[in-house]
Amino acid sequence: MKKIETIIRPDVFSEVRQALALEGIDGLSVTEIAGCGRQEGRTGLFRGNNYEMEFHTKLKHEMVVEDHLVEKLVEAILNHASTNEVGDGKIFVLPVDEAIRIRTKERGAVAVN
């Protein structure tokens, strides 16, 4: 099994979510995060004062899938998350040694399906 973590722009979430659903992914965890990288900061206005905003709001998705699904899901994410601009995000694929569903104590791939 593999864990796929993605960091993407919030405005492409809907398209990415639909693409994953078409590939059979029903469940994933989503977290609102803020970060900085090559995407430059921007100036914001708060209560009449300008200030430099170093961090950009992003969404982090996490899902654990069987190995044979990884490439198909990565392609779906790449096709729907890209705006061809700096700050589109990242995809990380990590090994998962074990998955256990707490309620039923099922282990392995059946625990994440």
Image (cartoon, rainbow, N blue to C red):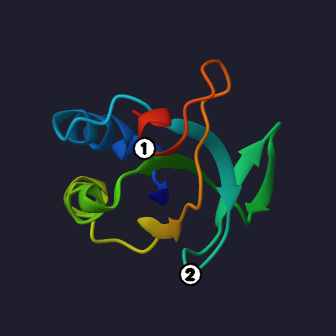
**Crowd rating for badge 1 (residues with CA inside 10 Å; few <14, some 14–19, many 20+):** some
What residue is shown at x 62% (from left), y 77% (from top)? 37
Q: Foreground residue, 79 or 112?
A: 112
- Compared across the picture, whether 39 is left or right of 51 comes to left
Quadrant in which the C terminus is drawn: top left
The Cα–Cα distance between marks 2 and 1, rounded to whole angstroms, is 36 Å
The quadrant where residue 47 appears: top right
Instruction: Look at the numbered disc 2 and give the secondary structure of its residue.
Output: loop
Residue ranking furthest to the bottom: 38
Q: Foreground residue, 25 or 102?
A: 102
Residue type highlighted by circle 1: Ala
Q: Tell me the number on the disc at residue 109.
A: 1
Residue type highlighted by circle 2: Arg
Q: Tell me the number on the disc at residue 38.
A: 2
> Residue 6, relative to residue 94: is it above or below?
above
The spot of residue 86 in percent (x, y) is 42, 74
Earlier in the chain: of badge 2 and badge 1, it is 2
The quadrant where residue 39 appears: bottom right
Q: Foreground residue, 40 or 10?
A: 10
The spot of residue 50 in percent (x, y) is 78, 55
What residue is shown at x 34% (from left), y 28% (from top)? 26
What residue is shown at x 50% (from left), y 34% (from top)? 111
Closer to the observer: label 2 or label 1? Answer: 1
> Residue 95, relative to residue 99: is it above or below?
below
Instruction: Look at the numbered disc 1 and give the secondary structure of its residue.
Output: helix
The spot of residue 46 in percent (x, y) is 79, 41
Quadrant in which the N terminus is drawn: bottom left
Q: Tell me the number on the disc at residue 68.
A: none
